Image (spheres, rainbow, N blue to C red):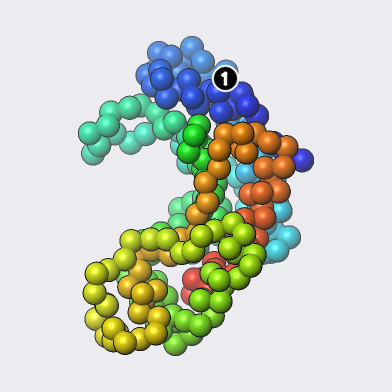
Amino acid sequence: MPVIERSTIKFLHDLSRHNDRAWFTENRSRYEKARENYTIFVQAVIDEIVGFDPIFKGLEAKSCMFRINRDTRFSHDKSVYKINFGAFIVRGGKKNGDRYPGYYLHIEPGASFVAGGAYIPPSPWLNIIRERISTNGDRLEKIIASTEYRSFFGGLEGEKLKVPPRGYSRDNPHIELIKMKSFLAETQFTDDVVVAPNFFNTVTGAFRAMKPLNDFLDVAR
């Protein structure tokens, strides 16, 4: 069973303290070892997801993983590198994150988490989700209230409009869900949990519990 090595967490911790090119160059071998560890873990997660969601068959970890270099052009934070490893497991790879729901794995010292669903879907997708909630919201309510889902996630997270979107009555029984602009399941982990031997089962269990939510949000199926 694949594991996240403690040395991977240690590298990211050290990177957060020495976020510059000179240090990174001196420690490139540590980075490559940590990235390889994360890549192997992500690929194993993808292969496990295929068992309950075959549409992901053939997807490679490298197409889902984000670069460690930060884009600082429009940011006040000029740190050169991210201090995490992240991968968005979605059909066709991370470039399709604005088209389909997926599964996200974030490894960062003291701030690791898994998440999934739809993050700020563009208007055409969002409009279809809202219409689906309006006509079949009971299904979504049951998904996020299920025992399996609640064993990992506290509910549904995401920014919400202050008033109902145009065309929806505030009397709609699912109006609070309709007002949402993102539809996210998320749960966080301590470093000890991340490096534990059973973390792979924890991650894949969370993603399995998340699948009915992704199915509901996936308007392309």
Q: Residue furthest right?
A: 1
Position of residue 214 measured from the top left corner of the image (x, y, whole percent): 54, 67
- Residue at the location (55% across, 38% down)? 190
Quadrant that contains the C terminus:
bottom right
38 vs 116: above or below: above
Position of residue 197 measured from the top left corner of the image (x, y, whole percent): 73, 37
Between 89 and 163, the one lying in front of the other is 163
Residue where numbered disc 1 is placed: 30
Quadrant that contains the N terminus:
top right
Position of residue 46 measured from the top left corner of the image (x, y, whole percent): 65, 51
State whether residue 23 appears in this view.
yes
Neighbours of disc 1 within 10 Å: few (<14), some (14-19), many (20+): some
Number of marks: 1
Is residue 53 toward the left or the right of residue 103 in the image? right
Kindly state the secondary structure of the residue where label 1 is placed: helix
- Residue at the location (59% across, 27% down)? 8
124 vs 44: above or below: below
Position of residue 92 measured from the top left corner of the image (x, y, whole percent): 54, 57
State whether residue 56 appears in this view.
no
Q: Amino acid at mark 1?
A: Arg
Is residue 186 toward the left or the right of residue 127 in the image? right
Between 114 and 218, the one lying in front of the other is 114
